[in-house]
Image (spheres, rainbow, N blue to C red):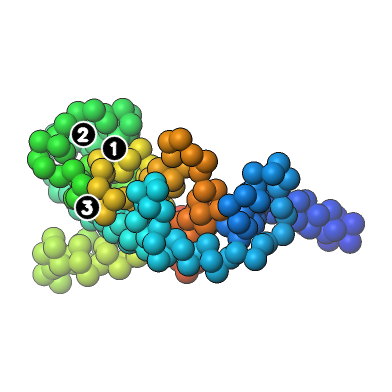
Amino acid sequence: MVEDRPFLNFLAHLVLIFGVAIVAMPLWLAFVASTHGPNDFMSGVVPMLPGPNLIENYGHMFSTGVSSSGMPPVGRMLGNSLIMALSIALGKIAISIISAFAIVYFRFPFRMAAFWIIFATLMLPVEVRIVPTYKVVADLGMLNTYAGLSIPLIASATATFLFRQVFLTMPDELTEAARIDGAGPMKFFRDILLPLSRTNIAALFVIMFIYGWNQYLWPLLVTTSSSKYTIVAGIKRMADVADAQPQWHLVMATAVLAVLPPLLVIVFMQRLFVKGLVDTEK
């Protein structure tokens, strides 16, 4: 039952505004800090309004970076993070959808055992297997490369499970009709399953892109060259300077820029993201 009373509407909006204010306050403080000078946040009084150094601070990060911390211009770090996030998202989707297709539509020995082995890898995130994974990547000469940043994070049991559940809900009549029309397995996969899984792929892309963009520990471990620093690992390096105060105004400017690409992905794919999580086009 939906209550439509003025007082309840006012109370609901008040709660929503309060919740938005709590969530947005750290982002606002980061933006405000990125527009002030280097000493404004060292006085003990936190400014609540933007300062006069917005163009100077952001221009400094885009043009020269922070040489004292070994940070390249922020554009390069954004590009590295974008390549890593796209590689992880697209790689996870490609591997997972093919794995789920094989598990659901093909009959071969130990089919379900293979699925449960994939599912069991949920208990082995990269943080658990980070030492042997680093050894393998180092032995293959993939340190400080985009392949080293992305390939160890591509396999995904969650995505395989999601696509398997989607394929299991497909009616058998689709498979029979495709077989009667003479469609082979790959034609059935390309012309029928992929279009019907469009919204699920979009929802998974948003989740995996943000997962790849926010990776912190693995890029920090496998990159020692500034040319391959990602934006999240770069913020960590900027905050950990030896024998000096961190330049918080530049750190906050970098943090604000790091938020923008995932935010744009969510904004532009919001409709497909929601539809892919709650609905299917069958």
- Horizontal side of residue 13 vs 206, given as left or right: right
The image position of residue 136, as x and y in percent, is 14, 34
Marks 1 and 2: which is nearer the front? 1
Amino acid at circle 2 = Tyr
Disc 3 to disc 2, C-alpha distance: 14 Å
Image quarter hosting the N terminus: bottom right
**Can you see residue 51?**
yes
Q: Residue placed at 58% from the left, 57% from the top?
A: 34
- Horizontal side of residue 203 vs 37, given as left or right: left
Q: Secondary structure at mark 3?
A: helix
Say few, some or many: other residues with alpha carbon within 10 Å of mark 2 (under 14 / 14 to 19 / 20 or more): some
Amino acid at circle 3 = Tyr
Residue 267, numbered circle: none
The answer to which of marks 1 and 3 sits earlier in the sequence is: 3
- Write down the residue under mark 3: 146
Can you say whether 133 is above or below 219 in the image?
above
The answer to which of marks 1 and 2 sits earlier in the sequence is: 2
- Write down the residue under mark 1: 221
The image position of residue 167, as x and y in percent, is 30, 53
- Write down the residue under mark 2: 134
